[in-house]
Image (cartoon, rainbow, N blue to C red):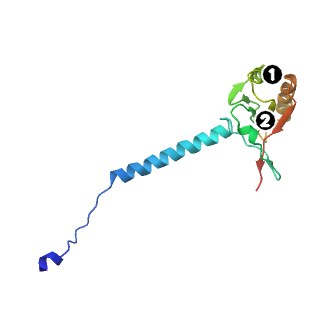
Amino acid sequence: MLHARFRSSRLVCRIDASALAAVFTVLATSLLLLQSVIFTFHGGVPAQLPRVRNAIALWGAQREDALLITIYRDGQLFLDGHRVAPEELTVGLRARVHDGAPGKVYIRADGRARYSAVASVLDGIHSAGLTHIAFLTEQSR
């Protein structure tokens, strides 16, 4: 009887590999989902947007067929995440509208971009026959 009540003082050190694998799987999946959400919303091209106090949510910019133009600080242009030359912008917009895209253009201009780059994009949009234009900004805190 005395022997049954005696407990061993040895430490048990084991790593449960299945729990470790489950944690890594969850972390990897969450990182992939977060990355896809970020690049899907921003059209795949990051830009530092200007901050405003009274921003309005423009849910149409999140549509898959939305016309999204991004202007970098150095003047590079991206139409729906694909780099285009300024002279190709009008042709690209006309082709997208012909394919069924809505007639509203969303511009994500970097807050440090030159006005001349933004003005040339606006000229290209008007040359394509589009008049509904929205500038995307971020809410200041």
Residue that lies at the very extreme toward the bottom in this rendered image: 2
Vertical position of residue 101 compared to residue 137: above or below: above
What residue is drawn where x is 80% and y is 22%?
90
As helix, strand or loop, the secondary structure at mark 1 comes to helix
Q: Position of residue 92 (x, y in %)?
A: 75, 22
Vertical position of residue 88 compared to residue 15: above or below: above
Q: Residues within 10 Å of mark 2 (few under 14, many from 20)?
A: many
As helix, strand or loop, the secondary structure at mark 2 comes to strand
Q: Quarter holding the C terminus?
A: bottom right
140 relative to 11 in the view: left or right: right
Residue 133's quadrant in the figure?
A: top right
Residue, disc 1: 90
The kind of residue on which mark 2 rests is Tyr
13 relative to 74 in the view: left or right: left
Q: Residues within 10 Å of mark 1 (few under 14, many from 20)?
A: some
What residue is drawn where x is 62% and y is 42%?
37
Residue, disc 2: 106
Question: Disc 1 to disc 2, how far (Cα)?
Answer: 14 Å
33 relative to 104 in the view: left or right: left
